[in-house]
Image (cartoon, rainbow, N blue to C red):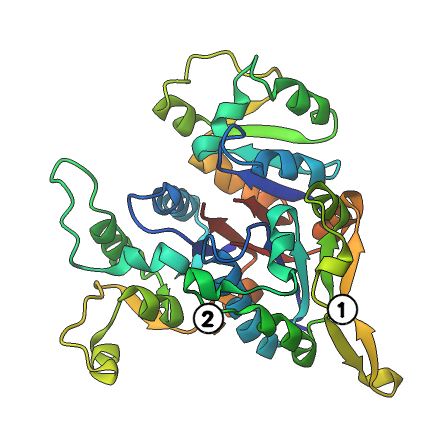
Amino acid sequence: MKFGILINEGPYQHQASDSAYKFIEAALEAGHEIFRVFFYHDGVNNSTRYTVPPQDDRNIQVRWSELAAKHDLDLVVCIAAAQRRGILDENEAKRQGKDGDNIAPGFRISGLGQLIEAGIQADRLVTFGD
Amino acid sequence: MSDVKKFLYVNRKQPYGTIYALESLEVVLIGAAFEQDVSLAFVDDGVYQLTKGQDPSGIGMKNFSPTYTALGDYDINKIYVEKESLEARGLTIDDLQHLTWEDEDEDWAEKDSIRVVSASEMAEIMDQQDVVLSF
Amino acid sequence: MAILHTVNKSPFERDALESCLKHALAGSSVLLFEDGVAAAVDGTAYADQIKGVMENVSLFVLGEDLKARGLGEHKLIDGITVVDYKGFVELAAKNDSVQSWL
């Protein structure tokens, strides 16, 4: 099975990001493929590398970056939602005249078409939100 | 082999109180370019998204409701609004925008895009979809 | 089609469960997870409504979310199946599509 995953909420505020992560872990363990993980609405906030959560708790952003690296996952952050919420990669920062970028490793910024494509190409699309 | 899937966008929240109504509409518009079989469902508080006469200037937000009238131009003309959700909220179809599309197979005749359906009809519509996006 | 409906919010907070049960056709499945697990406990104000649909709709609850909320040892509604994340994935794969009630 090819899964597309849509994450609508940011880290810590809602359980969505955690639930999606556990689902993806279980899916990979079962031998399924994760076609794409798409972050929309506040979900884009999962991709900032500037979070400093307490040491004795999970680091959601690092967890995503590591999972992406380990399994070659495609983590896509919606550009429109990212612009609204201040998530930038190097190119976007230059384009928008901002003095820095903040996107974490393993995430890439792209358009909503990537979500639609995931809906078309994957066998199942699972949404985690509020 | 055709890659055309039945996509349903489910809207259950009011506009302005949260961003889901606005940002889900943005997905619909971008998605239109992919020529899939698209339907929109407005259920529960989602019916408020289609009310006419929205004026959010007093709350300092942009009125994005005119965008719904463009859906017909994007070939999105299956807009299902749940009857029970309207009634529970003291609304009728007359409270909603009049959304239309032009049927090129019938000499560009203007037709209504909004179809008011019962909950059980909505359940059948949902059951037929390949991909359901919820916001 | 056989749909897996998911409900992640508590019925005491949100009408997602109520709306889901109104739209779930016979042969479909409903998975309660995150805050939605509150509905799986027997004796709640929603128990009768849930028992009512279970003749035609299969109910599942994510065990890890029950445990997180201290509900792991509570009596659940008869007929609800407890699954883990592996089971969640299986449900998603086994059914034709997934519809999330947020």
The quarter in which the C terminus of chain A is drawn is top left
Tell me the amino acid under the disc marked 2. Answer: Leu
Name the residue located 70 percent from the left edge and 45 percent from the top edge. Answer: B85
Rendering quarter of residue B48: bottom right
Name the residue located 85 percent from the left edge and 84 percent from the top edge. Answer: B105
Which residue occupies the foreground of this view, A38 or B11? B11
Mark 1 Cα-neighbour bin, 10 Å: few <14, some 14–19, many ≥20: many
**Which residue extends farthest left?**
A55
Q: Secondary structure at mark 2?
A: loop
Residue at the disc numbered 1: B113
**Which residue extends farthest right?**
B106
Contact between marks 2 and 1 (CB within 8 A): the answer is no
**Which residue extends farthest front?**
B58
Look at the picture and state if C45 lies above or below B119. above
Q: Secondary structure at mark 1?
A: loop
Look at the picture and state if A48 lies above or below C99. below
Rendering quarter of residue B53: bottom right
The location of residue A32, given as percent across then percent down, is: 46, 51
The location of residue A112, given as percent across then percent down, is: 46, 70
Q: Which mark is residue A112?
A: 2
The location of residue C101, given as percent across then percent down, is: 56, 43
Look at the picture and state if B1 lies above or below C41. below
Name the residue located 64 percent from the left edge and 49 percent from the top edge. Answer: C96
For discs 2 and 1, the disc positioned in front in the rendered view? 1
